[in-house]
């Protein structure tokens, strides 16, 4: 049996995080607007739990970035493959991640890719040089660490 999964990341601004990671990875910000609009029109959800983000109606407390080649539900816009889901939490990040994303670049492109990510809002935290390899540790706009190799 194969299990489906998504990586869920706590966030103070899920829409900004989904936008950053979609740009960083070449993903798409999920478009849930058709479902949101349908539920609003039916009176099934209050407008207070929605916002306008990325030019469309969205859930206030959830936003996702999905791989553009993976399947998704037409009615909800929810990705069914590689997906990062950001959920709003009230507290900011305070400790080191226990799980992180590694971004792999083409040979010789690490520094150029790191510079692109910094242009999107990431910060370079440190360079790691070990006998088994080298990489850069960066943080996303909400200070979640990730590595660029």
Image (cartoon, rainbow, N blue to C red):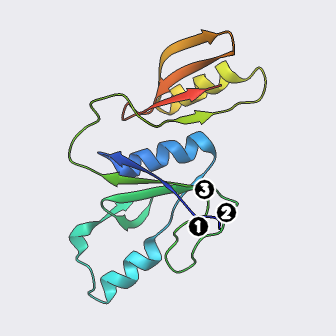
Q: Quadrant of the C terminus?
A: top right
140 relative to 84, above or below? above
Label 3: which residue?
82
Q: Position of residue 26 (x, y in %)?
A: 64, 46
Q: Position of residue 3 (x, y in %)?
A: 59, 64
Q: Quadrant of the N terminus?
A: bottom right
Per the rendering, the mark at residue 131 is: none
Badge 2 vs badge 1, beta-carbon distance below 8 Å: yes
143 relative to 111, above or below? below
> Distance of mark 1 from mark 3, alpha carbons?
7 Å
What residue is rendered at 35% in x and 65% in y?
59
> Is the residue marked by circle 2 packed among few (<14), some (14-19), or many (20+) residues within 10 Å?
few
> Is the residue marked by circle 3 packed among few (<14), some (14-19), or many (20+) residues within 10 Å?
some
Q: Position of residue 57 (x, y in %)?
A: 38, 68
> Distance of mark 3 from mark 2, alpha carbons?
7 Å
- Front in this rendered view, residue 120 or 75: 75
| Element under disc 3 | loop
Count of marks overlaid on the render: 3
What residue is rendered at 30% in x and 29% in y?
95
Identify the image quadrant of residue 58.
Answer: bottom left
Label 2: which residue?
70
| Element under disc 2 | loop
Q: For this view, does 123 lie left or right of residue 90?
A: right
Badge 3 vs badge 2, beta-carbon distance below 8 Å: yes
* Residue furthest to the front: 1
Q: For this view, does 80 lie left or right of residue 31?
A: right
Disc with the residue nearer the chain's start (2 vs 1): 2
> Is the residue marked by circle 1 packed among few (<14), some (14-19), or many (20+) residues within 10 Å?
some
Label 1: which residue?
80
Q: For this view, does 67 lie left or right of residue 40?
A: right
What residue is rendered at 39% in x and 84% in y?
38
Disc with the residue nearer the chain's start (3 vs 2): 2
């Amino acid at each position: 049996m194969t299990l489906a999964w998504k990586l869920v990341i706590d966030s103070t601004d899920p829409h900004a995080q989904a936008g950053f990671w979609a740009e960083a990875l070449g993903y798409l910000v999920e478009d849930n607007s058709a479902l949101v609009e349908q539920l609003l029109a039916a009176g099934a959800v209050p407008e207070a739990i929605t916002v306008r983000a990325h030019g469309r109606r969205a859930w206030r407390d959830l936003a996702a970035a999905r791989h553009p080649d993976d399947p998704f539900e037409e009615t909800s816009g929810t990705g069914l493959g590689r997906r990062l889901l950001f959920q709003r939490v009230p507290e900011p990040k305070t400790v080191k991640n226990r799980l992180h994303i590694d971004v792999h670049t083409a040979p010789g492109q690490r520094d150029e890719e790191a510079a692109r990510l910094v242009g999107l809002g990431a910060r370079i935290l440190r360079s790691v040089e070990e006998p088994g390899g080298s990489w850069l540790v960066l943080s996303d706009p909400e200070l979640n660490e990730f590595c660029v190799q």
